[in-house]
Image (cartoon, rainbow, N blue to C red):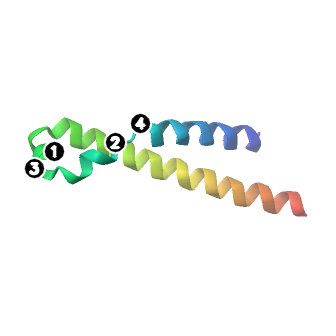
């Protein structure tokens, strides 16, 4: 079960990393004009960090449980 969640989190993480647009971060004046774009970018960043932490936590947990 944990391996399935780990694989799904990796796939979702890859998707959100590809979806992330790093060029939009340097254009603060234009991002303020388009509030929805900035909000979407912030939400994508938050979701990416959440799945990053899930992936790393499961990686550590799975590797430590396999050694015992």
The residue where tag 4 is placed is: 19
CA gap between label 1 and label 3 equals 5 Å
CA gap between label 2 and label 4 equals 6 Å
Quadrant of res 63: bottom right
Contact between labelled residues 2 and 3, with CB atoms less than 8 Å apart:
no
Q: Which residue is at 87% across, 57% downward?
A: 66
CA gap between label 2 and label 1 equals 12 Å
Label 4 neighbour load within 10 Å: few <14, some 14-19, many 20+: few
CA gap between label 3 and label 4 equals 22 Å
The residue where tag 3 is placed is: 29
The residue where tag 1 is placed is: 31
**x, y percent for residue 68:** 91, 64
Q: Is residue 60 left or right of residue 49?
A: right
CA gap between label 4 and label 1 equals 17 Å
Q: Nearer the viewer, residue 2 or 52?
A: 52
**x, y percent for residue 2:** 74, 44
- Residue 21, disc: 2
């Amino acid at each position: 079960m944990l391996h399935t969640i780990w694989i799904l989190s990796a796939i979702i993480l890859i998707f959100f990393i590809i979806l992330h647009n790093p060029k939009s971060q340097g254009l603060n004046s234009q991002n303020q004009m388009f509030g929805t774009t900035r909000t979407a970018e912030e939400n994508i960043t938050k979701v990416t960090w959440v799945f990053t932490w899930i992936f790393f936590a499961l990686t550590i947990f799975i590797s430590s449980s396999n050694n015992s």
